[in-house]
Amino acid sequence: MPSIVLATLNAKWIHASFGLRCLRANLGDLREHSAILEFEIAQRPADVAEAILAVKPRIVGLGVYVWNVTQTLQLARILKAVRPGLVLVLGGPEVSHESEAQPIVAVADHLLRGEADLAFADLCRRVLAGETGIPRVIDAPPPPLEALAWPYDEYTATDVAHRVVYVESSRGCPFTCEFCLSSLDVPVRRAPLSPFLQQMQRLLDRGVRHFKFVDRTFNLGAAAAVAVLRFFRERLADGLFLHFELVPDRLPEPLCAEIAAFPPGVLQFEVGVQTLDPPTSERIARRQDHARALQNLRWLREHTGAHVHADLIAGLPGEDETTFRRGFDALWAAGPHEIQVGILKRLRGTPIGRHDREHGMLWSTEPPYEVLATGAVPFPAMQALKRFARYWDLVANSGRWTATLALLLRGPSAAAAFGAFAEWLHGAARATAGIAQERLARFLWQYLVDHRGFAGPEVGAAMAADYARSARHDWPEFLRPYVAPGSGPRARRAAGPAARQARHRGG
């Protein structure tokens, strides 16, 4: 039975916790007396507690994040009620800031704030040795990455075969964007490059093909980014998929050349544009060359096989609906495959709250602490933006409606056109989730033909082409007259990131 259990509630089973693996790898001589137990937020807290207590640990460390804090509070209360003598340790971004008033912190025996790779091991040694007088709250300074044990052997054979494998070549961010927790993690610290690449080779040798880099600014150091990309390009294998977060306005020529050398379907870039309004950028201390960012996005789309996912935030202080729509239209024109419209959140510890009085910021008090209204965007308009974001994800980001989307967005403003559809769809469906594909197809037909007045054959041809590409077999009856010869339902394609990319490319 392990003395130490490291546990967390993941959003989905496929997401293997990178943080827990970093902690276990750095336990030293205590590693063999520890275990990682991962669960999902959909599981009942009592069932999770039962599984943890069944192994009779003396110490339980829980990773707490904005997406799991509500369920983890319930879990923590059950653990301490059933086993009062259990030493409960909390860590993670959600409890590392503004911790004093949090109910979950009151339940715990110890709180580790910050990067606890080494601090957790030290705390466990002191607890297991019976030491008294250990501080309840411990602030862990950022450790140098060269001092840490690599966490990658903590991925099991099941993880390698079926789950997302997270890796990092750096920590920290040099920017000071006020909405982001990474702005508190300055400066950037890099893992030693050669040993890091050796670890990546070990993962490749074990069969890992899907790598998700969690670096906040992968391309900030161009030389290191080029070296990492070249390493993988020289080892191309079937199914290889690499995900990186990019700073949008920094693509020097050597990095461009390396990116362009990859075949389609291997690279995915998450590009944090966030806003294209200069006054808003200045207001939130975001340094970005907007023209260069758009130029780089166009280059990525036109000259590489990378899949480009761009992030845009709605509800930033002082930014109104007109400004948001203008930014969305400029971003859409640059051609990313996906635009993720995120709603601004007041994450604990971030300085975005300093704008509350001047810009009328109202926040939800429940996780994930989304903005409810601002002085520039009243509550009903903010609700409309949230519906826009949800339906955009359902229709555009799914990649299933590329031909139909071109009709939906026809007009001088893509944002205005889709916003009108989103409000119509909300009135018709009265839901923003749980809309089945066939029901959505009927709504799209009804909106485009009956509401917008498009010709039935034009809409039918577009929707039938999308249905054929998605390899679905549940064709609505109203689309069958528009099925081109030989384009009926095809064999179902494999799921996963490669399939999603292919849908966006029209493959």
Image (spheres, helix red, strand yellow):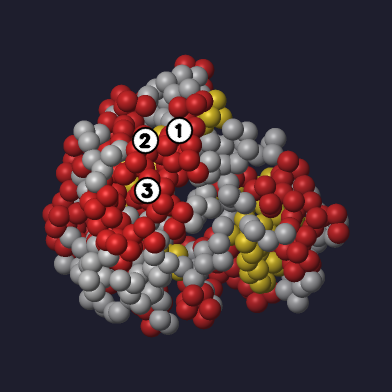
Name the amino acid, label 1. Ala
The kind of secondary structure element at disc 3 is: helix
Query: Residue 482 occupies which quadrant of the picture?
Result: bottom left
Q: Depth check: give the residue in front, 332 or 395.
A: 395
Q: Depth check: give the residue in front, 361 or 123.
A: 361
Q: Residue furthest top?
A: 358
> Residue, x 73% and y 41% (percent of image)?
103
How many residues crowd around disc 2 within 10 Å: few (fewer than 14), some, or many (20 or more)?
many
Q: Depth check: give the residue in front, 130 or 330.
A: 330
Q: Which residue is mark 1?
A: 384
Q: Are marks 1 and 3 in contact (CB under 8 Å)?
A: no
Q: Are marks 3 and 2 in contact (CB under 8 Å)?
A: no
Query: Residue 316 occupies which quadrant of the picture?
Result: top left
The answer to whether residue 365 is above or below residue 296 is above
Q: Is residue 442 left or right of residue 235?
A: right
Q: Which residue is mark 3?
A: 444
* Picture coordinates of residue 253, whole percent (x, y): 13, 54
Q: Are marks 2 and 1 in contact (CB under 8 Å)?
A: yes
Mark 3 and mark 2: Cα distance apart in space: 14 Å
Name the amino acid, label 3. Leu
The answer to whether residue 164 is above or below residue 352 is below
> Residue, x 45% and y 27% (percent of image)?
381
Q: Is residue 331 left or right of residue 182?
A: left
* Picture coordinates of residue 338, whole percent (x, y): 32, 51
Q: Which residue is mark 2?
A: 419
Q: Nearer the viewer, mark 1 or mark 3?
A: 3
For marks 1 and 3, the one nearer the N-term is 1
For marks 3 and 2, the one nearer the N-term is 2
Q: Is residue 420 left or right of residue 345?
A: left
* Picture coordinates of residue 315, whole percent (x, y): 43, 31
Q: Depth check: give the residue in front, 471 or 497.
A: 471
